[in-house]
């Protein structure tokens, strides 16, 4: 009896589609609307506000007989978002163990120490370069000064040559 009754109910539901029992609709000239329906096996409602935000929900009976529900929102700021009973839930974030926290702390401490050592080494190398450059420079009194020609060529002028020759003569006994 149960099998015959079940088959006749299934056949009857397939032959005659379920019509919405309740239907509501509203829309204005500004683009706002709302609608909804409800039937024995599903329901849906949706509303759009003046700011363009759309919210809605629906439910239905899945193939295994479970009632599935969903709620959604869509707006310009966050896009489309949905929460549904048949969607997987996001896993909880992984928390660090004490060993991982200790290793991370040791790593960052070693990194900071390495960076300080590198900065010290760069400073020492700069100081050594400055000292080396000073050793290679001629002493100021022996260093000839360059005089620029009028054309800025960087060559010593004839006047400078003459002055140097005069200084050399004066130094002679």
Image (tube, helix red, strand yellow):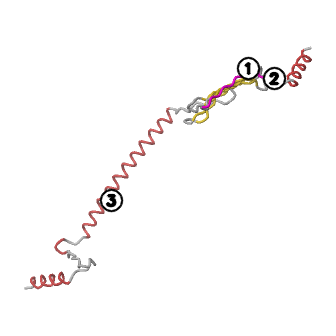
Residue marked by disc 1:
22
- On whether residue 26 falls in the magenta region, the answer is yes
Location of the C terminus by quadrant is: bottom left
Q: Look at 41% across and 42% down and name the residue there.
A: 109
- Crowding around mark 3 (Cα neighbors within 10 Å: few <14, some 14 to 19, many 20+) is few
Residue marked by disc 2:
18
Where is residue 111? Give x, y as percent: 42, 46
Cα–Cα gap, marks 3 and 1: 85 Å
Q: Check if mark 3's residue and mark 2's residue have beta carbons within 8 Å.
A: no
Q: Is residue 137 above or below residue 61?
A: below
- Crowding around mark 1 (Cα neighbors within 10 Å: few <14, some 14 to 19, many 20+) is few
Give the secondary structure at mark 3: helix
Instruction: Point out the frontmost of discs 2 and 1.
Output: 1
Q: Look at 81% across and 23% down and name the residue there.
A: 18
Say which label, 3 or 2, has the lower sequence index: 2
Where is residue 165? Give x, y as percent: 15, 84
Please give left or right for residue 84 compared with residue 16 in the image.
left
Quarter of the figure with residue 22: top right
Q: Is residue 11 above or below residue 169?
A: above
Taking depth in this image into account, of 12 and 122 the one nearest to the observer is 12
Give the secondary structure at mark 1: strand
Residue marked by disc 3:
125
Where is residue 45? Give x, y as percent: 67, 25
Q: Look at 39% across and 49% down and name the residue there.
A: 115
Cα–Cα gap, marks 2 and 1: 12 Å
Q: Is residue 117 above or below residue 136?
A: above
Instruction: Point out the frontmost of discs 3 and 1.
Output: 1
Location of the N terminus by quadrant is: top right
Marker disc for residue 32: none
What span is in magenta? 18-29
Please give left or right for residue 39 compared with residue 141 in the image.
right
């Amino acid at each position: 009896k149960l099998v015959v009754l079940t088959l006749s109910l299934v056949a009857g539901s397939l032959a005659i589609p379920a019509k919405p029992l309740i239907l509501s609709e509203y829309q204005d000239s500004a683009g706002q609307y709302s609608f909804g329906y409800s039937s024995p096996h599903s329901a849906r409602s949706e509303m759009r506000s003046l700011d363009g935000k759309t919210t809605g929900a629906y439910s239905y009976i899945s193939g295994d007989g479970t009632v599935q529900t969903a709620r959604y929102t869509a707006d310009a700021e966050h896009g489309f978002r949905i929460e549904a009973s048949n969607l997987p839930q996001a896993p909880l974030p992984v928390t660090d163990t004490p060993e991982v926290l200790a290793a991370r702390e040791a790593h960052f401490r070693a990194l900071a120490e390495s960076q300080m050592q590198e900065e010290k080494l760069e400073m020492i190398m700069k100081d050594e370069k400055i000292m080396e450059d000073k050793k290679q420079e001629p002493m100021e009194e022996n260093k000839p000064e360059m005089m620029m020609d009028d054309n800025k060529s960087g060559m010593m002028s004839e006047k400078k040559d003459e002055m140097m020759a005069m200084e050399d003569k004066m130094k002679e006994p």
